[in-house]
Image (cartoon, grey):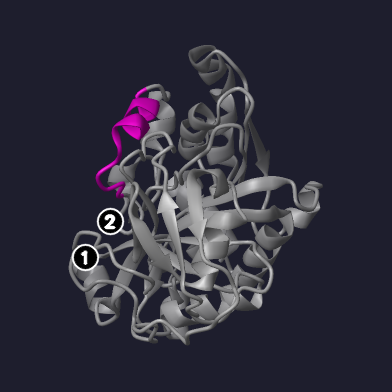
Amino acid sequence: MKKSVQEYYGKTLQSTQDLKTDACCTDGDLPRHIKQALSNINNEVLMRYYGCGLVAPQQLEGMRILDLGSGSGRDCYTLAQLVGPKGYVLGVDMTEEQHAIATKHTDYHAEKFGYANVEFRLGHIEELDKLGLADHSFDIIISNCVINLSTDKGAVLREAHRLLKPGGEMYFSDVYADRRIPQHLINDPILYGECLSGALYWNDFHNLAKQCGFTDPRLVEDRPLAIDNQGIQMLIGHIGFYSATYRLFKIDELEPACEDYGQAVRYKGTIEHNEEQFILDKHHIIEKDRTFPVCGNTYRMLNETRFAKHFEFIGSWNTHYGIFAGCGTDIPYSKENDSHHSSGCC
């Protein structure tokens, strides 16, 4: 299957127009500063992009970022501008043709940006241990519609956890299914290459993330995927697919549920491009200067990460009030495209 994916992305696909579905080619409504960064990227790099979402979390200046499945380098070159000259971005991809395009344009982008802070390596995202990368060496790990293509997703997440600094995060977009996909569909190279049949059942992903050390996966945004290709629809259209962005924090001993300790946070509005509100995840949209009740895990995700200086923290761990209402086990994705809504924990 690895060889099939390499063939599909290295030789079969020559631009986003060659994809048969929209599973791996939608950015959504990008913020202005991201659009500005994209305008500085070489056209060949842009044409060979096959991502499925936004992979630019907040507060990136000076960060060390690893991009898993970096492809032609579009996201790496975008983030390079956001981390600035004191930051660093490393892209890893297994497809020689994509890797060649990414490395071909490093000088172009260094001249465009006024500094060189991007590097690319050829390798498999399941085998990051073979690239000589040190433990705890990255602040953020991103990926854009690639982990579903991996044949060992557990190895990807375990290596990501090893490479992240304490308080770091994995922030990535990918495709998920509303059920487990039968093996005969997984074996179909077109369905797999289109980022469909390799997708994890969402609850299997949640459990796998927890097993790999990411105790409390947080869904940032999602959208249902429409399959417009009639042939593919006939094969796999009975399964619901979603493009979803998650953030996984490397914080030890997070609790398995949203426990209420009477805590709250207040956002100072000091993160660039996020002055009016801070979006931690789909259920935590925190307006500037508003006291916002949070569970113990959310409190720690803000207090033990790069976001701490941007918040005031209210309360202690002295009294436990039980679990926040609404922390159930239903499918977390929206059936229709909807706007974010703001509320307390879960």
Disc 2 and disc 1: Cα gap in Å?
A: 7 Å
In the image: residue 47, left or right of residue 10: left
75 versus 195 height, above or below: above
Q: How many marks?
A: 2
Residue 4 seen from this side: no
Range covered by the magenta-colored residues: 26-39
Taking the magenta stretch, the answer to whether it contains residue 33 is: yes
Amino acid found under the numbered disc labelled 1: Ala
- Name the spot of residue 241 as percent of width and height, x first: 31, 72
Name the residue: 58% across, 56% down.
303
Magenta span includes 176: no
Q: Position of residue 78 (x, y in %)?
A: 46, 32
Nearer to me, 217 or 259: 259
What amino acid type is highlighted by mark number 2? Answer: Asp
| Horizontal arrangement in the rendering, residue 316 relative to residue 212 (left or right) | left
Label 2: which residue?
Answer: 22
- Would residue 117 be visible to someone looking at this image? yes
Q: Secondary structure at mark 1?
A: loop
Q: What number is the disc on residue 226?
A: 1
